[in-house]
Image (cartoon, coloured by chain):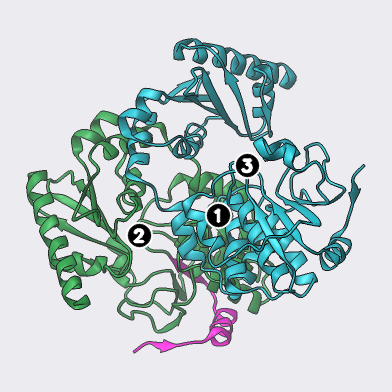
Chain colours: A green, B cyan
């Protein structure tokens, strides 16, 4: 049974906590790492022992967040998860943490897993909540904490571009710049820098970009042969997934990514009124309304594309019926 | 002789102005149009007669700013230029306006041309200054004014991504969202929507993308044949110009665009310590430190590329000497 806490209760919880272990989700992004390291640095400034555990390796562009942090060896008394919508997002490490004392998150859905939870789905990023908490417990917002929190906010909002961005988001970012966040330098790293191999992969993705359903559906595909030819890594394919939806007039964009093990991972992006998660569910997947995913386990790209197209047709058709 | 005004003096000037004509620069962008139409709507709410003149056609994505505006016919008594760094940026219309009574701008350089000038180079966009002025004269910030001002700020900062973004920029944007700016919808239009023809042009640009000078210089080219093949327009090439600098490690990015009349327009983008305008000046062009341009009038792409590479080599070499 999860106890839900408000800001003040969560601040009190943090002030009382000792020998803390912070957990981030697997396949870590800027928000889970920015929130985790900002919380770690803030709590350490209050003379607490704090460690952070990330189930996967930290991507090089975020590794600066851990600079200068040494981990003392102790048995954690308080385990806090940040930006972790569901315990299964701890992946291989889930079994290692049967008890999580506090969850700090901005995701609405997800199965409750912690003894206590401070969840605010109106926050664009978990980093917004960490900012409020650090202010509440009077932890100094150092330049390095500001960098971590700014990273969480800018990466989760596409640099304030997406609909989750609120006036509050912009005001917190303004404060973080005043606290010393290197906004321009961080944004350049996150949004304006790509490997040469990425551009080769994008060129191939654009060669495979096709528009169907009277301009409402765009799809592209990345095959193992393409990865091999340009030497790009699969994580570089993440950015490709945004492209099909960017075609003017498109309501659903899809990217098929051939798995090493065969079959295809499908990334879906949509604009209202199309629900990407509804399309994903038709194929045994799931996700959010604007971003969802599924897997199609057929060896041939043509078959996978046909299966996906059928599901998209069904969903667009169902919408038209609703619209009458 | 230009009289420079502060915020209060400019507000007083606006309150006393009658029968106003607002000028934007040619080849209009989101800031000159957003500033112009916001000022027009604000001054009209104070029962003044105001018209706006743009030397070129307003791009479709910005045309909503003019919705519902009708122009009365009168002889302008007060001519105000917004976001106009230099009178020659009125292009073909420059001769029509020998007298400009007030300039409101955020560009530092540029030859003074107006009788009075309110210039603040610390502002990320002229729209920041228009916001301050409208607040100062107590003009109501309507949702449509908020849309115009938000457009000016988001388009001039790459959606808060670039180094001109300040805490003040973010706070004004927060206010504009509260005043009803449709931030997510506008950002989707400006940053997340591209024509299919653009993607074809980008694919060709990526095919031509090459990196030189031990990874510090990246260059691509767009030929007339490419425009013809994909049916893209030259204004779609603007976004291409950002790509070469995005290659990891690159300090200078260049895009050669073949002109209808023959020869090539060159767009240069750089990161510190490389000064793009210094490279442009070596070829008779100019611009800003991070973004500059020039023209190379040789019919053959190979020759133009060689000329440009030589100028880049010279500039990088000069830098290394300075660095010792």
Looking at the image, is mark 3 or mark 1 earlier in the sequence?
3
Location of the N terminus of chain B by quadrant is top right
Label 3 – label 2 distance at C-alpha: 50 Å
Answer above or below: position of A250 versus B279. Answer: below
Q: Which corner quadrant of the image does residue B176 belong to?
A: bottom right
Determine whether the residue tagged by mark 3 lies in a helix, strand or loop.
Answer: loop
CA distance separating discs 1 and 2: 29 Å
A302 relative to A3, above or below: above
Instruction: State which chain disc 3 sits on.
Output: B
Mark 1 = which residue? B159
Disc number lying in front (1 or 2)? 1
Q: Is residue A317 visible?
A: yes
The label on residue B277 is: none
Q: Which mark is residue A26?
A: 2
Q: Are marks 3 and 2 in contact (CB under 8 Å)?
A: no
In which quadrant will I find the C terminus of chain B?
Answer: top right
Residue A232 shows in this picture: no
Residue at horizontal 61%, vertical 68%? B146
Residue B26: image tag: 3
CB within 8 Å, label 3 to label 1:
no
Residue segment shown in magenta: A1-23
Residues B107 and A27: in front is B107
Q: Nearer the viewer, mark 3 or mark 2?
A: 3
Chain under disc 1:
B
A143 or A109, which lies in front?
Answer: A109
Q: Position of residue A39 (x, y in %)?
A: 55, 67
Q: Residues within 10 Å of mark 3 (few under 14, many from 20)?
A: many
| Residue at mark 3 to residue at mark 1: CA–CA distance | 22 Å
- Front residue of A144/A313: it is A313
């Amino acid at each position: 049974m999860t106890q839900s806490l408000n800001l003040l209760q969560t601040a009190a919880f943090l002030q009382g906590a000792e020998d803390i272990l912070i957990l981030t989700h697997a396949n870590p992004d800027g928000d889970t790492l920015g929130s985790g390291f900002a919380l770690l640095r803030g709590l350490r400034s209050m003379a607490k022992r704090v460690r952070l555990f990330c189930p996967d390796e930290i991507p090089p562009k975020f590794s600066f967040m851990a600079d200068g942090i040494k981990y003392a060896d102790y048995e954690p008394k308080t385990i806090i998860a940040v930006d972790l919508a569901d315990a299964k997002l701890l992946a291989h490490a889930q079994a290692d943490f049967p008890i999580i004392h506090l969850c700090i998150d901005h995701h609405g859905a997800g199965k409750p897993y912690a003894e206590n939870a401070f969840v605010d789905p109106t926050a664009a990023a978990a980093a917004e909540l960490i900012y409020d908490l650090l202010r509440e417990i009077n932890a100094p917002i150092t330049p390095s904490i500001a960098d971590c929190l700014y990273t969480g906010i800018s990466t989760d909002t596409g640099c304030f571009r997406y609909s989750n961005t609120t006036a509050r988001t912009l005001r917190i970012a303004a404060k973080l710049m005043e606290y010393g966040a290197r906004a321009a330098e961080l944004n350049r790293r996150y949004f304006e820098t790509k490997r040469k191999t990425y551009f080769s992969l994008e060129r191939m993705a654009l060669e495979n970009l096709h528009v169907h359903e009277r301009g409402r559906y765009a799809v592209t595909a990345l095959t193992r042969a393409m990865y091999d030819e340009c030497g790009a890594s699969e994580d570089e394919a993440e950015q490709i997934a945004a492209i099909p939806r960017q075609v003017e007039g498109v309501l659903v964009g899809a990217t098929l990514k051939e798995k090493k093990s065969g079959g295809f991972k499908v990334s879906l992006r949509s604009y209202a009124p199309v629900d990407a998660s509804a399309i994903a569910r038709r194929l045994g997947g799931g996700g959010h309304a604007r971003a969802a995913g599924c897997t199609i386990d057929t060896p041939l790209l043509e078959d996978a594309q046909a299966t996906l197209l059928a599901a998209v047709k069904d969903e667009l058709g169902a919408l038209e019926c609703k619209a009458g």
